[in-house]
Image (cartoon, grey):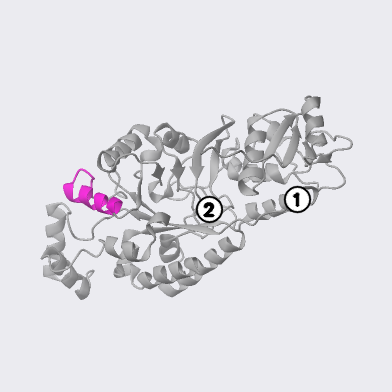
Amino acid sequence: MDIAPKATNIAIVVDQLHPRVCYAMDTVLGDFLGLVPRLIVSNDDVAIQEAQASGIPTFSYRRSFVEGMLALPCNGLLYEDIIRQANEEIEWFGAVSAQLRTVDYIAQIFYHLTQYELLRPLKQLELDRHDRYPDGPDGLYVHDLLDKVQESIFPHLAVRPQPRAFDFEITIDVDQPWKYLHKPWIVRWGGMLKALLGSPYMRPAEKQQRWQVLLGKQPDPYEVLDLVKEICPADKTKVFFLVDGDHPNDSRYNLRMPPYQQLVLDWQAAGFEIGIHPSYNTRHNPSMMQAQKALLENVVGEVRISRQHFLRYETPETFRQLIAMGIERDYTLCRATKPGPPTGVTLPYRWFDLQRNEATGLTLVPAMVMDRTLQMYQALSAQEALGSIKKAIAQTRAVGGKFVIILHNETFSDVGEWWGWQDVIRQMLKQLGS
């Protein structure tokens, strides 16, 4: 059955249908604020008169003031083809009418969503030891800007703002599918020898556990599918598999191993959407990334979602690679050392290729927090981590966002450094469902 398109409820008069303007209005007014905007070029007098005659609130988003028309402040950034140099200050004020605010909040939102700051010529970026971008400022600052836009325009509209429904997704990275099983024989025997000789780095409980697993008397602690099936809703849980790699930070496991193939199929059979977790060096190697996706697709069929291992990506190159190989949603955007999304928004949005001035079909899904951020970078206990997660959920719920968390299969194991985290996850899911 055909669904009738929604009626336009706001018209925007623009200098030109520039890709940046079209993307920003569709994303900010449409996707984020729930409006149905129509853009009209300023020299189309007939269309402007028709919109005004039909009672559609009509705003100007032009670089110069238009007498007698409501104006959204415009500083010109969205009409540019360039990326301004890092030493050039951006003036956010623009042409306005007396009734509306004076700051171009729509251009500011575009600036953050596109990670404009990372691409400015002459910009000196301080990358971390994994060559990741700086975490950036704290807070859900794009949501603050959205509030400013909403406060500016809705008093002039016939419709009232509709609150966004809170949503969530649990995402799980499988980097090490097993703690003891299926490792190369030299590694497995080396571990057994350490246990026999009483390695000072191996606790007695771990030695016993290793033997029990290798003797088939208990499951490997990282095999957590049954627990995940029990506590995580399949329709809101995505699982990303690291299937190959050539770096020490990659896994020892390769998806060409029959046990690993069966493990992935078991997760898929449980109803979880399967994604690719491209390995450490793939952000500069399109052929390697494509080969890993093909390896996974030979097992599970078409793969549409991804997240980069160690959150290593480079804009725009990594996102262009993902688009070229058919990825539709990417979950890489997450701060490594602090909670909070790196672009200040907890809503999925389409990626805009700033260098090419081109809107794309790739959706970016920012995450609010990662387990490793809390356990390793912030050195929090399990209960302290739970408090941080609950705070992040409350912040996301308050703005009607989508709470996304990055977990790992070993986080569910409740062994070693992850002792106490099963309860953290259960309590988190309880709050998400409340």
Q: Earlier in the sequence, mark 2 or mark 1?
A: 2
Residue occupying the point 34% across, 68% down: 418
| Kind of residue at badge 1 | Phe
Is residue 392 a member of the stretch shown in magenta? no
Coordinates of residue 431 in the picture (x, y in percent): 49, 69
Q: Look at the image and tell me whether residue 16 can be seen.
A: yes
Nearest to viewer (mark 2 / mark 1): 1
Label 2 with label 1: CB-CB less than 8 Å: no
Q: Look at the image and tell me whether residue 87 can be seen.
A: no
Residue occupying the point 29% across, 49% down: 248
Q: CA distance from mark 2 to mark 1?
A: 33 Å
Residue closest to the eye, 327 or 132? 327
Q: Residue furthest front?
A: 1
Left or right: 41, with 305 as reference point: right
Q: Is residue 165 above or below residue 285?
A: below
Residue beneath label 1, please? 154
Residue beneath label 2, please? 135
Secondary structure under the numbered disc 2 in the rendered image = loop
**Which quadrant of the view contains residue 115?**
top right
Coordinates of residue 170 in the picture (x, y in percent): 42, 58
**Which quadrant of the view contains residue 24?**
top right
Residue occupying the point 43% across, 72% down: 427
From which residue to which does the magenta span run? 253-269
- Dominant SS of magenta comes to helix
Coordinates of residue 189 in the picture (x, y in percent): 11, 59
Left or right: 96, with 129 as reference point: right
Left or right: 16, with 2 as reference point: right
| Kind of residue at badge 2 | Asp
Q: Is residue 136 above or below residue 124?
A: below
